Amino acid sequence: MNAVPKIPSSLTDKQFHYCPGCSHGIIHRLVAEALDFHNVRENTVGVASVGCSVLAYNYFNIDMQQAAHGRAPAVATGIKRVLPGSIVFSYQGDGDLASIGTAEIVHAAARGENITVIFVNNACYGMTGGQMAPTSLIGQVTSTTPKGRTQPEAGYPIKVTEMLSTLDGPVYLSRVSVHKPAQIRKAARSIQKAFRYQIENKGFSLVEILATCPTNWKLTPLEAVKWLENNMIPKYPLGEFKDVGV
Amino acid sequence: MKNLQLLIIPERCKECGLCRDACPKQLLITEDNINSSGYHPVSLPNAEKCSLCGNCILVCPDLAIIYEEVS
């Protein structure tokens, strides 16, 4: 019962603009619940990315900043260094973080900046119409790969969390999913842990969250959940890839 | 002693159906009427059978289902 409280105080009353069945709403709630859990709402600055979550500042009842495409970890670095007592997180999608923002995320992680990154991986560019993202799967049909992504044309998907786990900077890297109630509970614990490490000044933490995009996958919300389970999880295994904060 | 019950906010519902799938007792149904966004919201006609497992609350992306305290 304690795992599912009422509307968190870190969220505003505004209704989400996201499509029916989109995972962003669940992830917003989990982040807000983690901030409530640690009682840091009034001391937190969020950095929104470019993508569907660009309007996240409408929904989080905290100080928010909007970064240029992919630059959220750099902006978060600046905020954290100017306000070292605040809790700073970035909320980024895969098109933002794994494509144009690759340099920023890799170097923020390598520097071990004491920030938390919420990385929403839905295997496509959601806001712009479902184009292929660096995280799209081989064979996945998107609006820019109508016959499916192929390796000779578009290469292999990037596994960001595994890639960052080779660096010394991060203290906590995990991949979770929000397709089933049990997975959502695990995701909540993982996000809580990532923020706890930042509060304890341990260093860089990133939680990758596998999410659905029913509209651009051209599936119903229920079909999208099954697609995620059957196709994404085998390629993006769940778990904690690095945890040196204990 | 305060008890909990489910509160469904029809205006927030987008008819995605994730809660109906997550309910272990299949108690949630889609209503015939529509909300101001044009979606058919879910409702819980047999509330007394609900065990408050919270699965629907967890999977709802739009915070359309929450716990309500009743005294």
Image: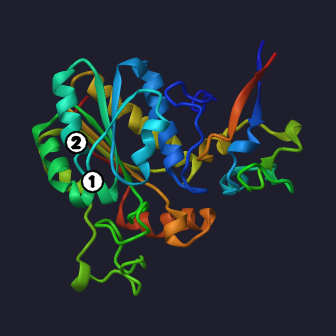
Residue at 17% in and 32% down: A78
Residue B18 position in % (x across, y down): 65, 55
Residue at 42% in and 26% down: A62
Left or right of A23, for residue A233: left
Quadrant of the frame with the C terminus of chain A: top left
Write down the residue under mark 2. A73
Q: Which amino acid is tagged 1?
A: Leu
Placement of B24 over or under A216, stated as above or below: above
**Foreground of the two, B23 or A140:** A140
Residue at 28% in and 67% down: A134
**Foreground of the two, A8 or B71:** A8
Quadrant of the frame with the N terminus of chain A: top right
Residue A205 position in % (x across, y down): 26, 38
Write down the residue under mark 1. A97
Numbered disc 1: what chain? A
Q: Which amino acid is tagged 2?
A: Pro
Asked where in the image residue A168 lies, by quadrant, the reply is: top left
Tags 2 and 1 in contact by the CB under 8 Å rule? yes
